[in-house]
Image (cartoon, helix red, strand yellow):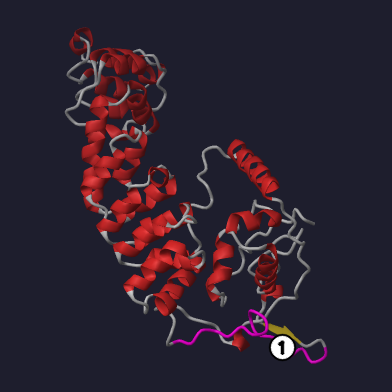
Amino acid sequence: MTDWIPKPNPQVDLRTLVLSAEEGFVLSRLDGATAARNLPALTGLPPERLQGILTRLLSQGALLPAAQGPAPAAARNPVATSPTTGAASPSPSPVGGPGRVAPSPSTVSPGYEPLSASATSSAPEEELPMLDLLPQDAEEHTSSESGADAVESPDEEPAVDDEPEVALGNFRQLFETRLHPQTEDHRVALARACEDPELSALCFDPLPAVIKAVLENSRVGLAHARLIARNHRNPVGLEALCGRAAFTADTGVRRWLVRNPQLPAGLFRRLWSTRRLMELYKVTIDRDVPESTRRSSREVFRQRFTTGPAEEKVEVILNTEGRALASLIGMSVDGKTASLLCGRTYRSPMLIQNIARWSAAPPPLIAHLLKQEAVRRQPQLRMLLARHPNAPADVKRGGG
């Protein structure tokens, strides 16, 4: 049982549970693939402490029982039915176990709605496997699991990119109720030496000095960098975050940075000027990105297209079926890019149409498209290519 894998229960709305900041932190680290014995290395918490946290999470229904599928709806019903009378009776124990008290409405963040004890009940507790872990075993097991995941789904991004909303709410609540009332100097000193969940909570601090202190903490990691990129709203603090190359190389950090409305245009150009053209194009069309950042991304995209490798140019044209060409009006391609484009077979009518509408399409590419079977079978495509300024003269004379 040491390899039991705790998995969040997808049929339970975690926002309805009253979790402590520490429980929310542990829940945010559960990706459904990491064994329980590896959690001490992942969270930094001792096995005995984790055992109690996992027990409480399981009792509240936040986790799936070991070796079972999703719990049926009846198991999560907040009231129990008496076998003799059929009447509903409240659960005898409140959520979270003995000693747990729901936060007062006067001390919680806006939008936080704790449940009353009569509205929730704890599921029957199940015995959890003991956490038996050696550090070297954790590193080997974690690396083997991550390698297996990469083979099974190479195109999927890591599941830890986003913190669950329940964890974010708990971190923010901890900051607002316990940390924010303290002085700036005290928070700065605390940020340099504290550990989770306080370290994650301080990522919500609006002061750049505190964010810089968080980044100086030896325990800071990618999860904290993603929290800062997502929630910090001061350009000075974002500059400090982007000063760490290991963080800016992370996909999750970059994703939240471009969605941050306070990301300076100069900082975006500095970080994204060396990114792949395909990644830049995704930013230009992302509706979650502020318009000012999208405008900067279009400028960087055009500049990068001029100097980028031919392989990346071909990649962005083919993978977008030519939609990226709408952002490249008036820009031409070099001989190597044209040669690579002419060396492919084209079957997508959408791609052929977009290239035909691209005024800078090189003459060899237009001639190559006219020879494609898809163009021969569709006269409208051939007519569209024949009207291109760079179409062969004999095609123009023939009228398509």
Which quadrant is home to the C terminus?
A: top left
Quadrant of the rendered structure where residue 83 is?
bottom right
Quadrant of the rendered structure where residue 57 is?
bottom right
Where residue 142 appears, as percent x and y from the top left, is 64, 46
How crowded pointer 1 is (Cα within 10 Å; few <14, some 14-19, many 20+) is rated as: few
Bounds of the magenta segment: 84-105
Where residue 334 appears, as percent x and y from the top left, is 25, 17
The relative height of residue 189 versus residue 37 in the rendered view (above or below) is below
Q: Which residue is mark 1?
A: 92
Residue plotted at (31% across, 18% down) = 337
**For this rendering, which residue is in front, 195 or 392?**
195
The relative height of residue 231 versus residue 19 in the rendered view (above or below) is above
Residue plotted at (35% across, 12% down) = 371
- Main SS of the magenta segment? loop
Question: Is 61 displayed left or right of 330 in the figure?
Answer: right
Residue type, numbered disc 1: Pro
Where residue 184 appears, as percent x and y from the top left, is 32, 72
Q: Farthest residue in the right direction?
A: 84
The relative height of residue 168 versus residue 30 in the rendered view (above or below) is below
Where residue 351 appears, as percent x and y from the top left, is 35, 28
Q: Farthest residue in the top direction?
A: 394
Quadrant of the rendered structure where residue 59 is?
bottom right
Which quadrant is home to the N terminus?
A: bottom right
The answer, for residue 22, to whether it is visible in the render is yes
The magenta stretch spans residue 90: yes
